[in-house]
Image: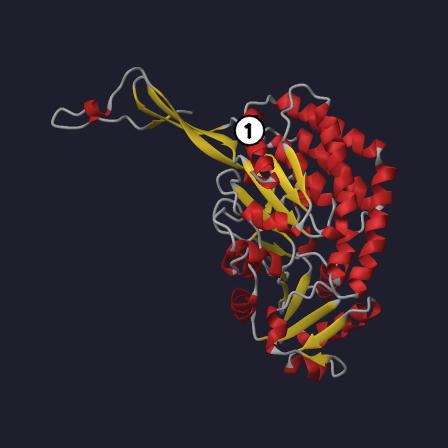
Amino acid sequence: MNNIEDIAKKAKAASIALAAMKTEDKNNALEKIAKALIDNKEYIISQNNEDLNRAKSLLEKGEISQAIFDRLKLSDSKFNDMVAGVLDVSKLPDPIGQTLWANKLDEGLELYRISCPIGVIGVIFEARPDVVVQISSLAIKSSNAVILKGGIEALLTNTAMVKIINDTLGKINLFPDGAINFVESREDVNQMLSMDKYIDLIIPRGSNKLVQFIQKNTKIPVLGHADGICHIYIDEEANIALGVKVSVDSKIQYPAACNAVETLLVSEKAAEVFLPKLYDAMTKENVKLKGCEKTKKILPNIEEATSDDWKTEYGDKILSIKIVSDVNEAINHINDFGSGHTDCIITDNKKTAEHFMNYVDSAGVYHNVSTRFADGFRYGLGAEVGISTNKTHARGPVGLEGLTIYKYKLYGSGQIVGEYTGANAKAFLHERIK
């Protein structure tokens, strides 16, 4: 029996124990983890700096992208947000054991749908060491066991934080061993993907290449998104200053993020006024602009966009621009080329905004606000395991509720199906229990 199978079996056993844990015990564990992270901040940051130094050579060799390198750094603000996320999760309602609905089938025969954990979740991610803490805290609160596989570029940081978390949990008597697991090598990924007997869900967080590889090489359900091609549409009734402000933030606040804007669609009636102001603002931020033929007539100094630009996630300070006739052309472009992640309209016309938000088929549809708000922490979910563009189970930033499923509990008093079939069959009541 190989090591990954040992880990997966142990995680499966831990998931059974976790499912019955009390809310106060889980919250206590999270509070202690937050304190342990703060107490070990200097050590964690030192390990992250070592990872950054090693990653520089990987970047120079082209083995990792600039976007991955940027995501690797655990800055003071990111560290503080990470710890705050753990405490926020501890304060959220427990998603487990909740009655979702109840139905009286007959007198003395009652059916309840009850929320429960998924079980064992495998998370495969690149860079972003804060993912370790985010997912561990969400897994604990949602009573799931987790197997984490991070990228080699963040190995020291990931290893340090997993050890701190497990050392903390090891001092809590009620906490099962094997709840939080960490594997290191690339070979471990293929073995994880074959563990459908023990692992219930795979969540990939990383490049399009990583996500597609996972989706094609496992029988385990996969939750996540392959691309983050986000759009902003500048309507003819847009507030120009607001449009520039939101567009700049959506692009440059964190260009490597999956919720950064990649394509700007501009109404032909707003283009002459809006585009020069956008050009000035983006140029100051060293953003490279690409535009369609109509855009280049207004901004002749920018590079011409090709059809590939409309389906490219840059993850960098690059923005493609296309002039469209109206909101409907913008909607069609987004539904054709978008990834179903997050898309925004800038307009003062509420009716147009609602039309856009109803017809754009994405996990997040925004009005007059930066696409960078597509985040579990900002949504008040405490943290997130990732952003899903799936249309089953969970969509958008996935927090606690996205890590739960449900089971049916039927309480009876000796009833048999034979009593409800045939010529003298009893009728079901099917009355909702409040």
Residue 284's image quarter?
bottom right
Quarter of the image with the N terminus is top right
Residue nearest the observer in this picture, 5 or 231: 5
Placement of 12 over or under 45, stated as above or below = above
Quarter of the image with the C terminus is top left
Farthest top residue in view: 413
User: Hey, what amino acid is under mark 1?
Assistant: Ala
Mark 1: give few (<14), some (14-19) or many (20+) Cα within 10 Å. Answer: some
Residue nearest the observer in this picture, 195 or 310: 195
In this rendering, does residue 387 appear at all? no
Placement of 289 over or under 23, stated as above or below = below
Residue at image point 66% right, 73% down: 321
Residue at image point 55% right, 23% down: 20
* Residue 356 x/y as whole percent: 54, 61
In this rendering, does residue 192 appear at all? yes
* Residue 195 x/y as whole percent: 52, 43
Q: Is residue 380 left or right of residue 410?
A: right
Residue 409's image quarter?
top left
Secondary structure category for the residue under label 1: helix
Residue nearest the observer in this picture, 325 or 166: 166
Q: Which residue is mark 1?
A: 13
* Residue 314 x/y as whole percent: 69, 66
Farthest front residue in view: 1
